[in-house]
Amino acid sequence: MSEIEQEPELAFRRRSTQDALMTCSTPTHNHSCEGITCPHCLMTTTKTTLLAENEVEAQKLANNYKFGFKKWKSHVTQRPLEDRSAIVKELYSDLNVIKQYSGSLFTFGNLLYVLLFGWWVAMLYLIIAILMFVTVVGIPHGKLCCSLAGYYFWPFGKVIQKNLNDSTGSFQPYLYPRKSSVRFHGEDIPEATAVETTNLLGVTERIGDASLHTTSAEIKYWHRPSTYLWFLLGYLPLVLVHGLASFIAWILVITIPVAKLNGRAIAVVLLIPPEQLQIRQPKRVKNISSNTEVPLDGEVVLCCYHAMNFYYYKYTVVGINVFAVNLLPLVIVALVLGYGDTENRYASSHVKFALSVIAIVPLSHYIGMAIASISAQSNFAVGAVVNATFGSITELTFYITALIKGSHKGNKCYEEVVKSALTGTLLGCVLFIPGISMVIGGCKHQEQRFNSRSAGVSSALLFISVGGVFAPTLFAKAYGSLICQGCTNSTQNGSGPFECSDCHFSGLQNALFHSHVQPLIYTVSILLPASYVIGLVFALKTHNHIYDIHISDRHLSGHSHNVVIHWSRWRAVVLLVVATVFMSACAELVSEHINPLLSNSAISSYFLGVTVLAMVPELPEIVNGIQFALQNNISLSLEVGSSIAVQVCMLQIPILVLFSVIYPVGFNLLFSDLHLWASIFSVILMNYIFMDGKCDYFQGTALVVVYLIIMSMYFFAPSQSGC
């Protein structure tokens, strides 16, 4: 059980410095709800005050409640490390402090370290040791390698320390965590403070930490010929080995402590003179307060207790989640293979398609982070424009490239895939994102409540948008003709009934389509964006009291007003443009290599569009919705899906129609029956569940089950002829 689970009240207090504090005030009550929405507040509140760590975070939190703005969970500013929970502090701690530890070190994670890393790293150290012994002048380094071989085979509970007895006679004390001060040799030593500035090797820069000091012995060390022999024969091979181990451990995420362990060896341990390094087992001495592990002598260079920590899924680098960082190399691999291997010598089209689709996930995360950072540092007008233009850029880049590709090849399957992806995004945002958020949030909170009035604004816009998008389809079915294909007659004279395999209503006859259906499509494509603008004015200007959001001028106590922003405005703009360019390149590869899947795969184009192409780009939004639900802020989880669905209908589809006018690609708003009725039924179901302003995991399960049933229908649905 985690520390948060063991101490709920303490964790509740700590969370005030991690997430926004929502203070809900009523005429007769004043109480605070940290990052959550309590039932009392929802029923009695007249004003919701967002008390954030700084003005930038407050602006980002306020944007989350605004219609038309991307809902973003991650912080856009750095948070002081000393104000965070002990679990998070452990994630960002350096491996150069001795901790109070009780319990066995023979854990599953530590034993797994030996099997995955320890034995082969130790073996290479022994090989390097033999090589250094042969050179004679490298005997000191050979002895060091023998010691380090044992250390890296099982480093847990051991300490690599640097001798304090040098020509400078300097002494630097140890630092112990989780204490305001510790007793060391009869002296009180204050605890170091830190801020969260983490590099890729997981080393947190700490203000006040004891740093490795340069001595006169180290200066002489770099004048020895044996040093450069060691650098050539020992250091370089070990850098490769530690680098490989660090990379593998970093990719696995939960083994990031192993990545830090190997990274510190490259940056610190192997560069210190061998006579100054010692590996010792700390002794346990009794202090006044508790037993603390203290080494006999020396400055701590490296010590580790655990090889795994499952909480590293929270780890961030410059505000970016570790999973998004780890997926970034796939973007480079996808682009290199896609544009460098045009003849599919090294990878098939299926592999390139999969890599390109996965590469969209981190790029979507970076685009979302850039939009949130720009909006938090800008005024309302700039934020609304950025969200309206770049909020749908991920999907639009694929849709447009796929339509262009299909137009060049004369293949209508690409248009059908785009329509399936649009419908799949709508179904996922209406059913799956709210449903999975309710299920996961409901497992932690018995019942969750939300503002039904604000949810009603999004629901009304969703009704308008879905009705507008599918109006041309209904119109064509009312005035179109029934067309049947694959018809056969079993009788000899042809007088018997015909059996047809594919019958559908069509409004594509030249007279009907060009004179009636096409003008209706253009009319709808003008009215939907106009409705979106009216919704922005209604929700953000004339009726913004519906959301009852107020940004307090006060800040949480103990926080510095020196705001450190992860991405400055210009940096966010540059990264937004770069990520958009890469997104366009990946979308081009997806549309290029999807053709073999459409022609040779047993999976229908319907299912491919409504699942993979629709939901993979929305993975960051799904994660945001789940995180909001876990904080008992289900209203934002619902808004995540609703805002995307509204943008799909009111912005993305009209833009595609406009693009088809400028660059004829044959896109129209005539959807299949399955798209039509699945979307209408889903919107009706969502509005029915959201009527009472409360939800639980059972209602979420109903939404998820309906979504899976509809996806099963798409899976078994036959593709159109030629697809």
Image: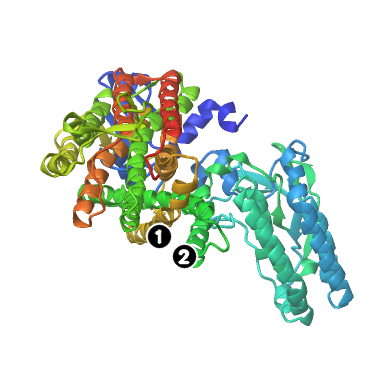
- Using the numbered discs, state the Cα–Cα distance from disc 1 to disc 2 in whole angstroms: 9 Å
* Nearer-N-terminus badge (1/2): 2
Image quadrant in which you'd find residue 43 = top left
What amino acid is at disc 2? Tyr
Helix, strand or loop for disc 2: helix
Task: Give the position of the C terminus as an image quadrant.
Answer: top left
Expressed as whole percent of the image width and height from the top left, the position of residue 32 reads: 37, 27
Give the residue number, with chain letter if any, for mark 2.
339
What amino acid is at disc 1? Ala
Disc 2 packing (10 Å; few <14; some 14–19; many ≥20)? few
Expressed as whole percent of the image width and height from the top left, the position of residue 281 reads: 81, 50
Give the residue number, with chain letter if any, for mark 1.
585
Q: Say if mark 1 contacts mark 2, CB within 8 Å.
A: yes
Q: Residue furthest front?
A: 493
Between 152 and 563, the one nearer to me in the picture: 152
Judged by depth in the image, the label closer to the viewer, 1 or 2, is 2
Residue at the spot x=77%, y=82% of the render? 225
Image quadrant in which you'd find residue 37 = top left
309 up-or-down from 203: above or below: above
Residue at the spot x=23%, y=29% of the render? 463
Tell whether 711 sits left or right of 652: right
Expressed as whole percent of the image width and height from the top left, the position of residue 375 reads: 29, 49
Q: Residue furthest left?
A: 515
Residue at the spot x=74%, y=72% of the render? 167
Helix, strand or loop for disc 1: helix
Determine if residue 452 is in view: yes
